[in-house]
Image (cartoon, coloured by chain):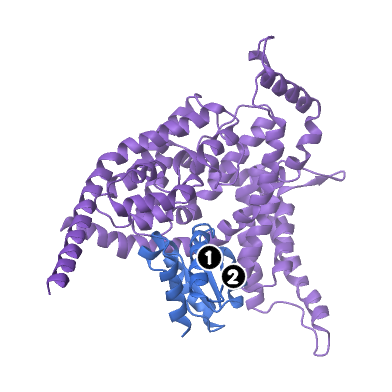
Chain colours: A purple, B blue
C-alpha cells in the first residue's frame, strides 16, 4: 500500500527529523529568545496603533460623520505629538536587537548551565561592540533594531559558545580556597570578558577595515537571499505545507516550523514598522501577523470554517467536537479539532488539512503583494481572533474582509472531504446504535 | 496532588486543565492543576507531582523525562483521543495512575 508507506515515512522518518530540528539547542534558544521579546514588541505595537489612526485625511470630505471627525482629530493630535507617542516604540522595537540578544544568550546559557546573568551581560557587550559604535556620547541605533536581529542571533550564539568552551577548558582566574564564592566568581569572568571583547571588537575592526561595513551590515547582506526566498509565494507555500505535514503526524507544526521561520517573519514585520515610521513604503508581505491571521485562520490547517461545518454535522462525534472547539477556534486554538476529529493520520482529511492552508497563504500573499490589502507592521498577540488581528496588524479594514473571505474559501475546500468523512462516521455511529439496540433487546428476551 | 500540563504555549492545555478541574471536583479530589508553556518547563517542574504533555509536543517527551527524572517526577503524553475530546476525567485518571 503506497498510502501506508507514505504514512510510515511521515511518522518514522519525517516527524523524528523535524522533532530533532525543533529541539536543536541553538534553534531552540533563538525561538525562546524571540518569544521573550514579545511583551516589548506589543508595547511598541500599541504605540504604533496610537500613532497611526486608520484614516487618510486626504480622502475625507468636509461633511464627514462623527467617527470620521474623531479619527481626524486623533490623526492631528498624533501627528503633533509624534515623538512623544513613539517613545515607547523607540525604546522597545527600535532596540529589538538588544532584547533579542538578551533572550537568546539567556536561553542558550541556561541549556549549558552557565551563569545566566554574566552570560547575558557578555552577549550584550559583544552585540553592542559590533553593532553600535558610539560617537560623542551617542549610540547609533541603526543596527539595534530589526536590522540587527540576525546579528543578535549570530553574536548571541557565538558569545555563549565561546563562554562554554572557556568554561570547559577552565580558562579563568582561580582564587585560593577560602575566598568567598561571590568574590571568586567576579574574578572568574574577567578572562572570558576580555577574550570576547578582543574577538568581537577585533573582528569588527578587521571587517570595517576590509569592507567599510559594520558586521550587522555584512550579515544583512549575507542573509538577503534567504530573506527574499522566505518572503515569497514559494516561502509561504513551503512553510504552510511543512507545518501541516507535521500536524498530520500529530506534532505541533507551527512551533516546529517556527524554529526555522520565526526570525525571518519577526524581522519582516518589524522592518515594515520601521519603514512605516520613517514614512517609506513597507517591503515585506510574509510576516508574523500574516502567518497568524491570514494563513492559520482559526488554528493550524485554517480549521475555523471546518468548526462551523461540524456544528451542523449529522455525526454526533463531529457535532460535539464542533461545540467544544468553537470558542478556542475563535482565538486560533484548534487542538480539539485536530485531535478530536481526529485530523491526525486521517486519510480522508489529509488533502484539505495539509493543502487548504498553503493555498490560502499564497492567495493572501498576492493580494497583499498587489496592494489590495495593507502590509502588516503591528503584531497583536496571536490569540487575537483572526479578522480583528488582521485589521489591527495592518490598520486596514480590508484585511478583515480578506480573512473572512479566505475562511469561507477554506470552508468550500473542506466541504466535500468533510461530507465524505461525515458519511463514514454516521454509518459507524448508526452501526453502533444498532448493535446496542440489539444487545438491549437480547437482554430483554433472555 | 499537583499536576502540570504543558504544550507549546500552554494554551490548548489550559482548556484541558479547566475540564480536569471539573472532573476533580466531581470526584471530590483535592488537586492543583496548571498549564504552562514548554519553554519554562525546567523552571517549574519541581513544583509538581506529575507532568502530562499535550500529544502535539510528544517530541519533547524524552527531553522532559530526563529533566523530571532528577526530581523523580513521572512524565507522560496525554492520550490524543481524550485530549481532542477534552475528556477531563480520563486525563485525570491517567495522572492519578502515574503517581500510584
Secondary structure beneath disc 1?
helix
Of the numbered discs 1 and 2, the one sitting upstream in the chain is: 1
Per the image, the residue denoted by label 1 is A25
Q: Are marks 1 and 2 on the same chain?
A: yes
Residue A395 percent coordinates (x, y): 60, 30
- Given residues A31 and B29, the one toward you in this image is B29
Label 2, secondary structure: give it.
helix
Q: Which subunit holds the residue at mark 2?
A: A
| Residue at image mark 2 | A111
Chain letter of the residue carrying label 1: A
Picture quarter with the N terminus of chain A? bottom left
The reply to whether the C-beta atoms of the residues labelled 1 and 2 are less than 8 Å apart is yes
Give the residue drawn at x 51%, y 66%.
B22
Q: Position of residue A367 (x, y in %)?
A: 45, 28
Front in this rendered view, residue A444 or A51: A444
Q: Nearer the viewer, residue A204 or B19?
A: B19
Q: Is residue A91 left or right of residue A244?
A: right
- Expressed as whole percent of the image width and height from the top left, the position of residue A247 reads 38, 55
Amino acid at each position: 500500500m503506497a498510502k501506508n508507506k507514505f504514512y510510515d515515512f511521515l511518522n518514522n522518518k519525517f516527524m523524528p527529523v523535524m522533532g530533532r530540528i525543533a529541539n536543536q539547542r541553538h534553534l531552540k534558544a533563538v525561538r525562546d529568545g524571540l518569544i521573550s521579546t514579545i511583551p516589548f514588541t506589543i508595547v511598541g505595537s500599541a504605540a504604533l496603533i496610537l500613532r497611526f489612526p486608520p484614516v487618510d485625511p486626504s480622502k475625507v470630505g468636509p461633511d464627514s460623520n462623527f467617527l470620521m471627525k474623531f479619527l481626524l482629530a486623533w490623526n492631528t493630535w498624533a501627528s503633533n505629538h509624534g515623538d512623544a507617542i513613539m517613545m515607547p516604540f523607540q525604546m522597545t522595537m527600535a532596540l529589538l536587537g538588544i532584547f533579542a540578544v538578551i533572550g537568546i544568550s539567556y536561553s542558550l546559557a541556561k541549556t549549558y548551565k552557565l551563569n545566566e546573568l554574566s552570560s547575558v551581560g557578555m552577549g550584550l557587550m559583544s552585540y553592542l561592540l559590533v553593532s553600535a559604535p558610539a560617537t560623542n556620547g551617542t549610540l547609533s541605533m541603526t543596527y539595534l533594531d530589526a536590522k540587527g536581529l540576525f546579528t543578535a542571533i549570530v553574536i548571541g550564539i557565538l558569545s555563549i559558545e565561546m563562554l562554554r568552551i572557556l568554561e570547559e577548558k577552565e580558562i579563568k582566574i582561580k582564587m585560593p580556597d577560602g575566598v568567598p564564592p561571590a568574590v571568586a566568581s567576579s574574578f572568574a569572568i574577567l578572562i572570558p570578558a576580555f577574550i570576547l571583547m578582543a574577538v568581537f571588537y577585533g573582528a569588527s575592526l578587521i571587517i570595517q577595515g576590509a569592507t567599510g561595513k559594520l558586521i550587522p551590515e555584512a550579515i544583512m547582506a549575507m542573509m538577503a537571499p534567504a530573506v527574499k526566498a522566505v518572503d515569497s509565494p514559494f516561502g509561504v507555500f513551503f512553510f504552510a505545507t511543512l507545518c501541516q505535514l507535521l500536524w498530520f503526524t500529530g506534532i505541533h507544526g507551527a512551533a516546529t516550523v517556527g524554529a526555522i521561520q520565526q526570525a525571518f517573519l519577526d524581522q519582516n514585520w518589524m522592518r515594515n514598522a520601521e519603514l512605516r515610521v520613517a514614512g517609506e513604503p513597507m517591503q515585506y508581505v510574509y510576516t508574523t501577523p500574516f502567518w497568524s491571521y491570514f494563513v492559520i485562520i482559526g488554528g493550524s490547517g485554517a480549521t475555523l470554517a471546518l468548526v462551523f461545518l461540524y456544528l451542523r454535522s449529522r455525526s454526533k462525534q463531529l457535532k460535539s467536537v464542533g461545540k467544544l472547539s468553537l470558542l478556542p477556534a475563535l482565538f486560533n486554538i484548534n487542538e480539539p479539532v485536530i485531535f478530536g476529529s481526529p485530523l491526525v493520520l486521517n486519510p480522508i482529511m489529509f488533502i484539505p488539512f495539509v493543502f487548504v492552508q498553503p493555498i490560502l497563504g499564497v492567495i493572501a500573499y498576492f493580494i497583499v503583494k498587489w496592494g489590495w490589502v495593507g502590509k502588516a507592521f503591528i503584531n497583536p498577540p496571536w490569540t487575537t481572533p483572526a479578522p480583528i488581528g488582521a485589521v489591527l496588524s495592518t490598520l486596514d479594514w480590508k484585511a478583515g474582509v480578506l480573512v473572512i473571505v479566505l475562511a469561507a474559501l477554506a470552508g468550500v475546500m473542506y466541504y466535500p472531504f468533510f461530507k465524505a468523512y461525515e458519511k463514514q462516521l454516521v454509518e459507524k455511529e448508526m452501526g453502533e446504535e444498532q448493535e446496542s439496540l440489539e444487545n438491549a433487546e437480547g437482554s430483554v428476551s433472555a | 496532588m499537583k499536576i502540570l500540563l504543558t504544550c507549546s504555549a500552554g494554551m490548548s492545555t489550559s482548556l484541558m486543565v479547566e475540564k480536569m478541574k471539573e472532573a476533580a471536583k466531581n470526584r471530590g479530589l483535592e488537586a492543583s492543576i496548571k498549564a504552562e508553556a514548554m519553554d519554562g518547563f525546567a523552571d517549574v517542574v519541581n513544583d509538581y507531582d506529575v507532568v502530562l504533555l499535550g500529544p502535539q509536543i510528544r517530541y519533547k517527551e524524552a527531553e522532559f523525562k530526563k529533566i523530571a527524572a532528577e526530581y523523580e517526577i513521572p512524565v507522560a503524553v496525554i492520550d490524543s483521543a481524550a485530549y481532542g475530546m477534552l475528556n477531563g476525567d480520563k486525563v485525570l485518571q491517567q495522572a492519578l495512575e502515574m503517581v500510584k
